[in-house]
Amino acid sequence: MLTYEPGESLAHRLDPRSKLAVQMGFAATALAHPTPRALLAFSGLTAVALAAARLSLRRTLVAYRFALLLLVLAPLLAGVTLGAPWFDRSAAVASGLASYRVLLILLVSAAYVRSTPVRDSRAAIQRTIPGKPGQLLGVGVGLVFRFLPVLYGDLRTIREAMAARLGTERGAVDRAGTIAVLGVMRAFERADRLSLALRARCFAWNPTLPPLSFSWLDYPVLVLAVALALSTFY
């Protein structure tokens, strides 16, 4: 599971607001330009983003392996037809290009998550979106970033415990049902403990957020974000 790791990479030194702007611009233009030539250029930008965060492509793909499986299956399922010719290559290619665009967006997002603390993400959102909507969105993002790795760890623990008790010899449906039930129970327990911890720490809707400031490194990144956003119209 990808989480923030301290570091001295170029992405770590950027302001989270400029990184969010690039993410949004990249996602918008990637979805607007499905051609192979455009996807080749987006692949280069994705490689730059991963290098800036010093994030391994193999490690990222392993972390996204479940989503990657769905992205691989989507073109195959899209190409299947109920009659002759039984497989539509044009539909499969269109779905494959769409899956590849989603994969690139996930990789760019992984570079952001790896290089940005949760508190900085919340500060960037609340300083960009004023008022209660920004506070609510900032709290939601902070809780998701903190809660998902914990839930993923619980599911991994459940699977390891089942394997230690020869649970792998049971049927796939039985194993999936057991993991789902235990996972939901753990999620509710975690939610109750999180609620109690927030009350015990006098959780505030508008706490003192970390200071954010643009450096000279952020201005070229902001120019890139604007260029990506404008490219959606061409």
Image: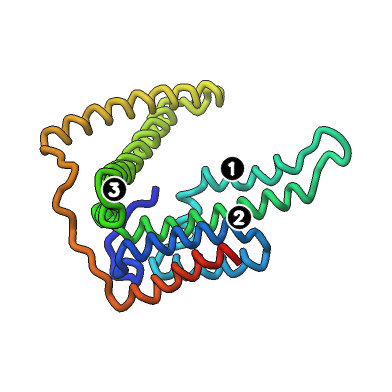
Is the C-beta separation of discs 2 and 3 under 8 Å? Answer: no
Look at the numbered disc 3 and give the secondary structure of its residue.
Answer: helix
- Label 2 packing within 10 angstroms: few (<14), some (14-19), many (20+): some
Between circles 3 and 1, the one closer to the viewer is 3
Identify the disc placed on residue 70.
1
Is the C-beta separation of discs 3 and 1 under 8 Å? Answer: no
State left or right for residue 211 relative to residue 89.
Answer: left
Residue 158, by quadrant, is top left
At 58% across and 44% down in the image, what residue appears? 69
Is 216 rendered above or below residue 152?
below
Amino acid type at mark 1:
Leu
Residue 217, by quadrant, is bottom left
Residue situated furthest bottom in the rendering: 216
Tell me which numbered mark, 3 or 1, is placed earlier along the sequence.
1
- Label 3 packing within 10 angstroms: few (<14), some (14-19), many (20+): some
Q: Which residue is mark 2?
A: 100
Tell me which numbered mark, 2 or 3, is placed earlier along the sequence.
2
- 120 vs 164, nearest the viewer: 120
Q: Which residue is mark 3?
A: 134
Between circles 2 and 1, the one closer to the viewer is 2
Amino acid type at mark 2:
Tyr
- 168 vs 194, nearest the viewer: 194
